[in-house]
Amino acid sequence: MKLRTFRIGGVHPEENKLTDDAVTQVAALPKQAIFPLSQHIGAPAKPVVKKGDKVKVGTMIAEAGGFVSAPVYSSVSGTVFKIDTVFDATGYRQPVIIINVEGDEWEETIDRSDKLETLSAHPELTPEEIVERIKVAGVTGMGGAGFPTFIKLCPPPTAKAECVIINGVECEPYITSDYRLMLEHADEILVGLELLMKASKVTKGYIGIEENKPAAIKLLTEKTAGNPNIEIVPLAQKYPQGGEKQLVDAVIRRQVPAPPAIPVNVGAIVQNVGTAYAVYQAVMKRKPLFERYTTVTGKKLKNPGNYLVRMGTPMRDLIDVCGGMPEGDNKVLAGGPMMGKALNNIDVPVCKGTNSITVLTDDDAKRKTPQPCIRCAKCVSACPMGLEPYLLATASSLHDWDRVEKEDITSCIECGSCQFTCPAHRPMLDNIRLGKSTVMGIIRARNAKK
Ligand code: SF4
Ligand code: SF4
């Protein structure tokens, strides 16, 4: 059978899924937990605690700072040590709340039992109530982007949702946290999908999973057998299939137009499997979002693995659990090697969007010397957004912002496929990222003036 996939571009990086058989372990509590107030797209959250306050696991420590924002909850019990700014993963100062950990006392409102709650047993859950619980619990996209989930469930009047697509693709090399979640919490993910479908007032749901995860495809297919409303869609392996627009194309054969269009403009609401699980916990267990599945991986790590991590835990603690930083030069990424962000400081905490900590060896990370472009057009064939990466990169490096805007740089999803495929090792993504962020700033300023 020919498997579905997206139609434009794509590449096949080496998988390196070193931890797909590693059953998830619970990571130890940190001594001190650090909570950035900006773990999501939108306005930073505003602190509602002060130095010296006592908090429990699940206490709200910062409220949403605007409509597009999300509250932050403590993942530990203890005392607020300080509210300060610290350097984040990319070297910018960020406001944070730091809590000294004492014991492990949870808010009584959280249901900690393993009992599976089903939607049919809770007819009182209206779409509005589901959206409200998701919003209050601070659930944001767990696949990396961090968009507040409740907003996606309330599309603008010009768009109509027809289906929910759960992203179980995990096409980034090395990362296995979503795969383990699908194997270990399939029932909860399916209830999470039903909640998302009810909240969006649609009757069709899909879970897209790449063919390199046959155990997850089999398990979820068995569990949904006889349910005509939910379809498990095996997908051919191709990067970046986990991109929202690529997934929509692969699963329902519709192409999302250029920004500002979003998937719901073609009828789809896309959520990650981790988000579906967080939705289940928020709605059925009244559990705010304060812990997540994270892969800690790398070829030279002694014990790479998958961990259930309380947010706020310093990444250094997790690398230590895996045997510590390997000898020699290493490059540590928050995320995978294609889209992850290089860290200049491993004391930064695990946040809502931290799906992986990847430790690359010098050999894997070292860039080759760039050569002149040979006009081979491989980058054009690889681009899943139908762009001309060589042109965007060159115009960005020349600071020709009018040209890059005209060439649609805002459609770039920063997947790195162009750079990956370039035989001349051109540093295209660096230049394109610079061009994209500059053009986005220019567009924002222009709109503000209007
Ligand atoms: S990084 Fe941007 S330009 Fe390069 S392949 Fe991905 S979408 Fe295309
Ligand atoms: S892949 Fe590299 S060498 Fe080929 S056209 Fe693109 S930038 Fe030039």
Image (cartoon, helix red, strand yellow):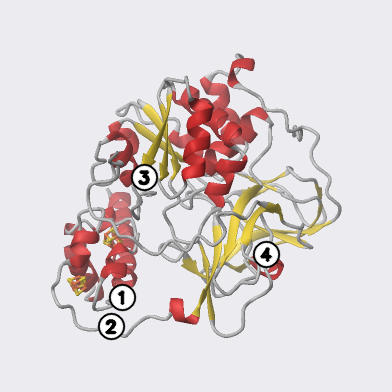
Q: Which mark is residue 244?
A: 3
* Callout 2–callout 1 Cβ contact below 8 Å: yes
Residue that badge 4 annotates: 318
Q: CA distance from mark 3 to mark 4?
A: 29 Å
Observer-nearest of 207 and 226: 226
Q: Residues within 10 Å of mark 4 (few under 14, many from 20)?
A: many
* N-terminal-most mark, 2 or 1: 2
* N-terminal-most mark, 4 or 2: 4
Q: Nearer the viewer, mark 1 or mark 4?
A: 4
Q: Residues within 10 Å of mark 2 (few under 14, many from 20)?
A: few
Q: CA distance from mark 2 to mark 3?
A: 31 Å
Q: Position of residue 341 (x, y in %)?
A: 47, 66
* N-terminal-most mark, 1 or 4: 4
* N-terminal-most mark, 1 or 3: 3
The residue lying at 38 percent from left, 80 percent from top is 367
State which quadrant residue 122 falls in: top right
Observer-nearest of 369 and 445: 369
Q: CA distance from mark 4 to mark 2?
A: 35 Å
Ligand 2 is within 8 Å of the C-beta of the residue at disc 1: no
Give the amino acid type for the residue marked by disc 4 in the picture: Leu
Specify the farthest residue to the right. 103
Give the amino acid type for the residue marked by disc 1 in the picture: Pro
Specify the farthest residue to the left. 375
Q: Which mark is residue 427?
A: 1
- Tell me the element at label 1: loop
Specify the farthest residue to the top. 123
Give the amino acid type for the residue marked by disc 2 in the picture: Pro
- Tell me the element at label 3: helix
Q: Position of residue 36 (x, y in %)?
A: 61, 57
